[in-house]
């Protein structure tokens, strides 16, 4: 397994996993939004990157990373917005490796925190998250818009 920053040639592999991820969260998006998102990952002026786990030429997992400023830190934070591993690659350390690569990315950018959210019912992912991170007890709210 190799983990690195996505390139244009990773789009088809990411797209397949991205659609599975959106299905998992029951959150369909128009293709235009997915195209826009992938373009942002490749744009050096955007505060977003995509890390992909590959076996050969096959993308088997990804982490979507968003950098942002914080009122609580001199340097920025990294929000691991999306993390997904192909069903066929689960249980082999791919998710952990993507989280570790995200942390290394954050350190290289001098960011002070890496954080993420998941649904409380995502028990499989939470088993890993409980091993590699702390749960601060915060509750996420979304404004009604």
Image (cartoon, rainbow, N blue to C red):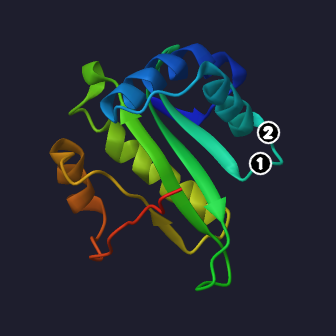
Asked if the residue at tag 2 contacts the one at tag 1, i.e. Cβ–Cβ closer than 8 Å, the answer is yes
**For residue 89, above or below residue 69:** above
In the picture as drawn, the residue positioned furthest to the right comes out as: 45
- Secondary structure under badge 1? loop
**Residue at numbered disc 2:** 43
**For residue 5, above or below residue 67:** above
Q: Quadrant of residue 67?
A: bottom right
> Which circle marks residue 37 in the picture?
none
In the image, taking residue 106 as reference, residue 58 lies left or right, namely left
Look at 68% across and 26% down and name the residue there.
Answer: 7
- Secondary structure under badge 2? loop
- The answer to which of 27 and 100 lies nearer the viewer is 27
- Percent across and percent down for residue 110 are 65, 70
- Quadrant in which the N terminus is drawn: top left
Look at 41% across and 33% down and name the residue there.
Answer: 27
- Percent across and percent down for residue 55 are 44, 19
| Gap between marks 1 and 2 measured at Cα | 6 Å
- The answer to which of 66 and 54 lies nearer the viewer is 66
- Percent across and percent down for residue 58 are 47, 15
Look at 67% across and 84% down and name the residue there.
Answer: 74
- The answer to which of 94 and 44 lies nearer the viewer is 44
- Quadrant in which the C terminus is drawn: bottom right
In the image, taking residue 27 as reference, residue 93 lies left or right, namely left
**Residue at numbered disc 1:** 46
- The answer to which of 28 and 5 lies nearer the viewer is 28
Q: Quadrant of residue 111?
A: bottom right
Look at 49% across and 53% down and name the residue there.
Answer: 80
Q: Quadrant of residue 8?
A: top right
């Amino acid at each position: 397994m190799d983990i690195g920053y996505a390139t244009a040639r990773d789009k088809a592999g990411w797209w397949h996993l991205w659609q599975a991820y959106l299905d998992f969260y029951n959150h369909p998006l128009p293709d235009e939004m997915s195209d826009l998102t992938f373009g942002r990952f490749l744009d050096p002026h955007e505060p977003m990157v995509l890390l992909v786990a590959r076996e050969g030429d096959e993308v088997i997992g990804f982490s979507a990373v968003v950098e942002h400023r914080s009122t609580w830190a001199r340097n920025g934070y990294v929000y691991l917005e999306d993390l997904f591993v192909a069903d066929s690659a689960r249980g082999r350390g791919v998710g952990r490796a993507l989280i570790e690569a995200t942390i290394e990315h954050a350190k290289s950018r001098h960011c002070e925190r890496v954080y993420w959210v998941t649904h409380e019912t995502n028990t499989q992912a939470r088993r890993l998250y409980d091993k590699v991170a702390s749960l601060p007890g915060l509750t996420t709210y979304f404004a009604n818009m």
